[in-house]
Image (cartoon, rainbow, N blue to C red):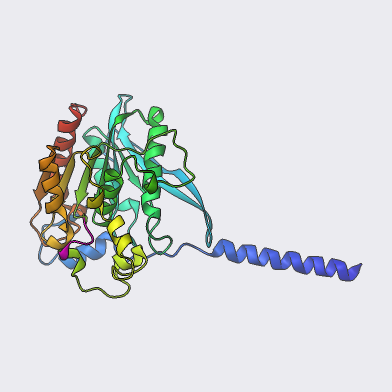
Amino acid sequence: MKKMLFHITMLLAIQLCFQSALAQMSIPTDTTYNIMRVYRQIKKEYPYAMPVKDSLPAGIKRYDNNIYLELEHPTFGTRQLHLDVFRPDHKKKLPAIVLIHGGGWRSGTKDMQVPMAQMLATKGYVAVPVEYQLSLEAQYPAAVHNIKESIRWIKANAERFHIDTTKIAISGCSAGGQLASLVGLTNGLSRFEMPETGRGVSSEVHAIVNFDGVIDFMAPSSLNLERKPDAADISWLGGSFESHPALWKEASPIFWADEKRIVPMLFFNSGFPRFHAGQDELLGMLKRWNVYHQVHEVDVKVHPFWLFHPWIDGCVNTIDAFLSAIFMTDHNR
C-alpha cells in the first residue's frame, strides 16, 4: 500500500512539473521592429520627425484587449487573440476601420496602430487595432484566418459599439498592408476562412487602405530581391519561391482581384518602390473596372512613415476624406 501511494505521489508530482513547464512555455516573440528603433535610424536625416504616442484624445472611449478568438495551439496550448476598440463617446452608429500592424509577418504588435486608431476615432470612426499570429508562432495562412475572424467579431458586437456593419474598412501597414489587401480582395472566398468557423456573420469588408504593402510577391521588384534563408517572406510562407511557388502566388493579393468582388482602395507609398510590387498592375484593373481608388505618395526614405509626425497627420486626413467619399457620410461632425 505504501509503495502504491509513493508511486501515485510521484506520478502526480511529475504531472504537476510537466504542467508547470508547459504553462511557462511562451509564444516566441521578435521585438526588433519597434518605433524607437526606427526613430534612432531616421532622426539624423529627418530631425523634425516625432514618434506617435498612445494618448487618448478627449471624447474618445477605449476598450482594450477584447478577446476575439481562442485557439488551441499544438505547442503553446490555449491561445487568445485580442483587439482594441476606440470610438467617440456617443451612441451614433459609425463606420469602422480595422487596423493591421506591420513587422514582416514576424514582429510588431497591435499597440503600434493605437495612435492612428485614436486619431481616426476623433474623425468619427470606430477604430480597431487587431492582434494576429506572427510567423514564429504560425505561418501563412493563420494571420489571414485570424483577421477575418476579427471582422466577424466586430460585426457580431456591432450593437455594443454602435457600428454600421455596411461600412467596414480595413487598413494595414507594410506586412499589414499586404494582409489587409489579401483579406479585402478575398471577400466571400471560403478557402481563406478558418475551416471550423461559423458562416452566420460575414467577414466582408467594403474598403481597403494599404500603407506600403506588397500586392504581388511574384512581381519582379519583389521576386528579384536578394534574400537570406530566414527572410521575412520566406519564413512566413514556409519556404522560398522556388520551393513553394503556388503558395507565393496564393498569398499575393493581386491574384484574387475580381471585378465582381473588388472594393475601393487607397494606397500610401513611401520612397521605397519595392514595397509597391504589383501595385501598378492592380491600379490598371481598378481603372478598367471603374472602381474608386487613390494613390498618395509620401516621398521620404522612411518605410514606416505612419509611425511619425508629421506624416501620419496628413495620412489620417486622407483616409478620412477617402472613406467619407465612398461611404457618403459626414459622420465626424
Queried whether the magenta region covers residue 218, the answer comes back as yes
Front-most of residues 283 and 272 = 283
Taking the image as drawn, is residue 23 in sight? yes
Q: Furthest-top residue in view?
A: 92
Q: Which residue lies at the image location 44% right of the left edge and 49% below the top edge?
A: 81
Tell me: residue 157, above or below residue 245.
above
Q: Hey, which quadrant is residue 277 in on the image?
A: bottom left
Identity of the residue furthest to the right in this view: 1
Which residue corresponds to the image point at 28% horizontal and 48% vertical from the top-left? 180
Residue 55 seen anywhere in this rendered image of the structure:
no
Q: Quadrant of residue 217?
A: bottom left
Q: Which residues are magenta?
A: 216-220
Q: Quadrant of the C terminus?
A: top left
**Which percent across, then down, holds residue 247?**
33, 60
Q: Main secondary structure of the magenta part?
A: loop
Where does the image place residue 266, in percent across and percent down from the top left?
Answer: 16, 44
Q: Residue 331 versus residue 328: which sits nearer the camera?
A: 328
**Residue 320 percent coordinates (x, y):** 17, 37
Q: 38 left or right of 110? A: left
Q: Reply yes or no: does residue 100 show up in magenta.
A: no
